[in-house]
Amino acid sequence: MSDASVDVRLQAEPLDLARLLAFVQAPSLGAVAVFLGTVRDHHAGRTVLHLEYEAYPGMAEAELRRIAEDARTGHGAARVAVAHRTGRLEIGEASVAVAVAAEHRREALEACRFVIDTLKRTAPIWKREVFEGGAVWIEGEGG
């Protein structure tokens, strides 16, 4: 059973930050915190050409939902939206977006950080970095 105050998406399409913001905002909530992760052009001294994300959809969505619900029950968030891309992403494209709303800024900021930090450690989403001269899989918080 899913909570109506949590929205998670794993998608090949570009992220829609406006949709995430619209989902979390409410007249009773005075703070919205957002994290937007984008593909950068370098990592570990290499020129990055693009990234490729793969995920196990059922497990990844369940883990994203668990993380979002933990942000609500343990970190003061009232509403949480998380979206993560899959497939090939070019430099500058958004790969992950987190939007969190709470009554006050402290809770919103802490919950947003909890979501992105936990997602990077535990969600079954894998990143392949393609750079000049090769490619590597990046695990966990390695990028």
Image (cartoon, helix red, strand yellow):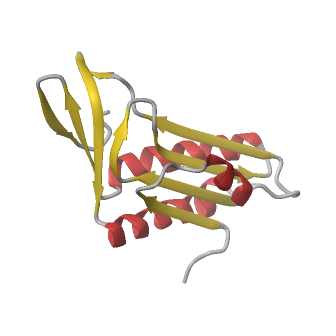
Q: 18 left or right of 112?
A: right
Q: Is residue 114 above or below residue 8?
A: above
Q: 23 left or right of 61?
A: right
Residue drawn at point x = 52 percent, y = 63 percent = 8
Can residue 9 be seen in the rendering of this structure?
yes
Q: Position of residue 59 (x, y in %)?
A: 33, 69
Residue 46 location, quadrant: top left
Q: Position of residue 110 (x, y in %)?
A: 61, 43
Q: 126 left or right of 109?
A: left
Q: Is residue 55 above or below residue 117?
A: below
Q: Is residue 105 above or below residue 16?
A: above
How many numbered discs, if any?
0
Q: 57 left or right of 135?
A: right
Q: Position of residue 100 (x, y in %)?
A: 65, 51
Camera-nearest residue between 51 and 21 = 51
Q: Is residue 134 above or below residue 21?
A: above
Residue 89 location, quadrant: top left
